[in-house]
Amino acid sequence: MARKSKSNLSELYLEENKDQIYENALAEIQSFELPLGTTLRSVYDDQPNAHQKFMEKLDACIRNHDREIEKMCNFHHQGFVDAITELLKVRADAEKLKVQVTDTNRRLQDAGKEVIAQTEEIIRCRVQQRNITTVVEKLQLCLPVLEMYSKLKEQMSVKRYYSALKTMEQLENLYLPRVSQYRFCQIMIENLPKLREEIKEISMSDLKDFLESIRKHSDRIGETAMKQAQQQKTFSTALQKQHNVNYGRNTPLGRNRILESKNEITLKRTFEDEDEHEEEVLTAQDLVDFSPVYRCLHIYSVLGDGEIFENYYRKQRRKQARLVLQPQSSMHETVEGYRRYFSQIVGFFVVEDHILHVTQGLVTRTYTDELWNMALSKIIAVLRTHSSYCSDPDLVLELKNLIVVFADTLQGYGFPVNRLFDLLFEIRDQYNETLLKKWSGLFRDIFEADNYSPIPVANEEEYRIVISKFPFQDPELDKQSFPKKLPMSQSVPQIYMQVKEFIYASLKFSESLHRSSTEIDDMLRKSTNLLLTRTLSSCLQNLIKKPHIGLTELVQIIINTTHLEQACKYLEDFISNITNISQLTVHTARLYGLSTFKDARHAAEGEIYTKLNQKIDEFIQIADYDWTMSESDGRASGYLMDLINFLRSTFQVFTHLPGKVAQTACMSACQHLSMSLMQMLLDSELKQISMGAIQQFNLDVIQCELFASSEPVPGFQGDTLQLAFIDLRQLLDLFMVWDWSTYLADYGQATSKYLRVNPSTALTLLEK
């Protein structure tokens, strides 16, 4: 029973629970607030017959609502009827009111049309006014932008690109951000980078035109700079000389007056030149418009590409430097070729120096020094090569002057030029070589034109003309009356004057080399020594060996060299006067004229001996002995008498020679004659000799001995000259006397009568 009662209670509880669930579901359905799907699912998920029970609950709920509605309607029905009745009563009044309202509205509309029109006009005007105000405000905001952009276009048109870049910067940073919402502003923003690129291209194009222009006109720039440097140096030199003259008033009067007059003339000409050029004082920089460089540098700096511009500029200038340093193949032929070459280089570095000083970092001192060192090496190599082709000393001198002006000009701009002056010393040696070649030709011409005869002077005037050219002094000759003859020939004063001209020419190269007087003196003496010891000596040696130079000419050459040797001390004085360096200075070099002319005399003396012997041989060759004659003719042979007469006349010419030279020549001739006669007797082709031929030969030897004893050249002691024929005389005496027993008995003894007779020689002649 307990279990049954518990079961009934559970069912009752479940039943009440279900009723409660259904009521909640109906309440939720009526509320329309929750999703019905969840509510219905909770109803149908419990029992299989839940649907039917729920529908029953739902129908019951509907019936309850219907009853409530019916009650409400019944309660309000009378009120509704009363309201309808009231409405019907006021219907007529409402229609009247409607008509009146309609009429009033019509009349009001008619009356308000004008007001409406005016009001609309006012509204439209106010809208326009507001729009105008807005437009004015916007235009006031945009107008500065447009003005700046217009200004930018104007600056572009007049090529004020740097200002245009500044304007662009203001537009971008200040003006355009205010109106960035407008489309024209976007167009401007898009155009600005294009304008920058356009400015860069235009400025770069101007720079390229500038570089091309200075490349073409660098020679004119350099020529102007060199001319101004030369004028400045000339002016400074003239002032210095004038100062030296004023300072040295105590110098010898004659020389001082000469120096003073020369310096005054030079200074006057310098001042006149300065006055002439005063109106056109143009520097090299004035000839070039550097604005493209400044403009391009500023533009690239503003655009942040300054380094790119610097690298481009330096690269292009290096290329131009290589072109400028490349010489023309025919440059060495004319001085104009060298002048143009130097002018181009000077113009190039004048421009670079100006760029260095007026720009900030476009070029640096390190860059210019590196460029100059490269250029200097190339210049020195070019000058060494091309100057080696120069054979004209005047052209070499012009080249030297150009190098000096070139060096002085660039030194004025701060470039080191010591290597150029070192090069000038190399060129100086070449200049001296060209001078030596030129003077070699002059000496040859002088020697060719000389008559090798003493200089005749008819009167005092002619005598003074000669001694004005050559320092000749002879007290004995001065005592003689006119007309008279000077011992040397015409070539001597001419040679002396040409040596002085050579010294002057050598001095020209030494000027402006920034060297001391001692160094210049040393250079002049060395070059003069080369002229004497090499050029003049060579010309004399060649002259002496020429076939057409005879004995008379050789004698005159010996006399000439003697006087030239004596004149060397005057040449030393001449050099000392030029350089103001005393000969007593320890390091002063001496002229080597003594050895030069002594060697020439020795060569001439040797040639005299040779030609005398050759002439003797010519006479000997015409000898025609009859070696089989039975007896002699009783007189000397004709060829021998002619030979003796020739020797006698020749030795008379030797009177002006130094005694030893004439004596040596005479002794040499006699010895050679004796040997030639001896060889004639011992000739292997001669097989037989008669005693008559021996007697005839003895007569000829007697004439030779008589000639030797006649002292054809004074100064021989005793029978010295006759001893030349002693071998021949003893041999002939042996055969003429036929004293063979004595010869054999005394052979080998110092007291032998036939001491000089060689046994083999005697035997050979005996066999014949």
Image (cartoon, grey):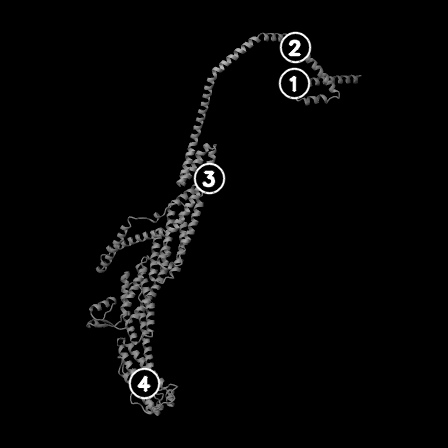
Residue at numbered disc 4: 726
**What numbered label is drawn on residue 193?**
3
Q: Quadrant of the C terminus?
A: bottom left
Instruction: State yes or no: discs 1 and 2 in contact (Cβ < 8 Å).
Output: no
Disc 4 to disc 3, C-alpha distance: 121 Å
Amino acid type at image mark 2: Cys
Image: 220 above or below 546: above
**What numbered label is drawn on residue 73?**
2
Residue at numbered disc 1: 31
Instruction: State yes or no: discs 4 and 2 in contact (Cβ < 8 Å).
Output: no
Image: 646 above or below 355: below
Q: Secondary structure at mark 3?
A: helix
**If you read the primary sequence from the N terminus, does the residue marked by circle 1 or circle 4 appear first?**
1
Q: Label 2: how many residues lie within 10 Å, few (<14), some (14-19) or many (20+)?
A: few
Amino acid type at image mark 4: Ile
Image: 110 above or below 306: above
**If you read the primary sequence from the N terminus, does the residue marked by circle 3 or circle 2 appear first?**
2
- The residue at 41%/34% (across/down) is 147
